[in-house]
Image (cartoon, helix red, strand yellow):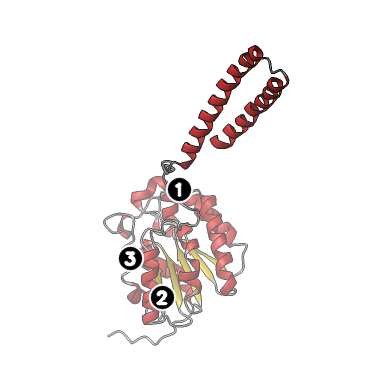
Amino acid sequence: MILPALLSHARTCACPIRRSTAVVLANPAPDKMQTVHRPLIRRLMLFVTGLLAALAFAAAPSVPASTPAAVPSASVPATENRFEKNVRDYEAADRASPPPKGAILLVGDSQFFRWKTLAADLPGYTVVNRGIDSLQMSDLLLFADRLVTAANQPRLIVLHVGGNDVHNGRKPEQVLADFQAFVAKARVKLPTVPIAFSSTTPGPARWDERAVRVQTNKLLKDYIGTQKNLHFIDLWDAMLTPDGKPREDLWVEDRIHPNQAGYQIRVKIMRPLLGEPDQKVAPTK
């Protein structure tokens, strides 16, 4: 940039020199020549000095400017979801032993993940459990294809999710919107499979959230009542005392997760949705 500017300046300076020289030649008197040539010589020397400096600057090696900190590209993938490993573990287990076709698929949070008495509580039923501790509706929506539609044509999908959403500040309307989006995704590959949604539960340790939980249950129940092949499993009232307080006998020590008595209430309420067992049950002795 500097060299072109100086060259431009040189052209500007050169024009008066040519005009002055022509004047000198046309007026050869020695006293006038001496008067005219002194300022011309000074200007010529200044021009030559500037031109030489510009040439020296242009020939010098360039020094790179300091490089700013790299800005992450938009194409760089975001940090993976916190449940990615859980989903990969289920996928690896499915590759080693593919889930049976036509099973009951349980998908949801810790209430399914910690259901250790599942086989004893539902004898004769083929059940695939995809519970993940602390899962939320937004997570289930993200992993719907990998956890649900890849499960080899289940005959019934049962969800228990939403309690963690409420606990983490999400509004009932957000839980409903995520559930609706989940259903839309599931219907692409499983258009007729019934989907049952379990209500949030009245765990004593989260009783202060009861108003939001009740509202969440109501929104989901009202919406599900208008849709085909959607069912609502209402656990809330069945886990309360006659005076409307949480039953303390239905929970493990943390007072959040049900014990086996709590799971038995679930089984009793959802049993009509399950149909007949698909396996023979050995008679009890």
Residue 113 locus on image (x, y percent): 35, 66
Query: Which is closer to the viewer, label 2 or label 1?
Result: 1
Residue lying at the far top in this picture: please name it: 31
Residue 69 locus on image (x, y percent): 41, 45
Please tell me how crowded label 1 is: few (under 14), some (14-19), or many (20+) other residues with Cα within 10 Å: few
- The Cα–Cα distance between marks 3 and 1, rounded to whole angstroms, is 43 Å
- Whether the residues at callouts 2 and 3 have beta carbons within 8 Å, the answer is no
So how many labels did they put on this image?
A: 3
Would you say residue 87 is visible in this rendering? yes
- Whether the residues at callouts 2 and 1 have beta carbons within 8 Å, the answer is no
In the image, residue 277 above or below residue 69: below
Given the image, on which type of amino acid does mark 3 rest? Answer: Arg
- Whether the residues at callouts 3 and 1 have beta carbons within 8 Å, the answer is no
Helix, strand or loop at label 3? It is loop
Disc marking residue 71: 1
- The residue closer to the viewer here, 253 or 3, is 3
Given the image, on which type of amino acid does mark 1 rest? Answer: Val
Q: Could you tell me which residue is drawn at 59 percent across and 37 percent down?
A: 4
Q: Could you tell me which residue is drawn at 38 percent across and 48 percent down?
A: 207
Q: Tell which circle, 3 or 1, labels the residue nearer the N-terminal end.
A: 1
Q: Could you tell me which residue is drawn at 71 percent across and 24 percent down?
A: 22
- 145 with respect to 98 (left or right): right
Helix, strand or loop at label 1? It is loop
In the image, residue 19 above or below residue 269: above
- The residue closer to the viewer here, 207 or 28, is 28
Q: Tell which circle, 2 or 1, labels the residue nearer the N-terminal end.
A: 1
- The Cα–Cα distance between marks 2 and 1, rounded to whole angstroms, is 44 Å
Given the image, on which type of amino acid does mark 2 rest? Answer: Val
Disc marking residue 128: 2
Q: Tell which circle, 2 or 3, labels the residue nearer the N-terminal end.
A: 3
Residue lying at the far right in this picture: please name it: 26
User: Which residue is tagged 3?
Assistant: 114
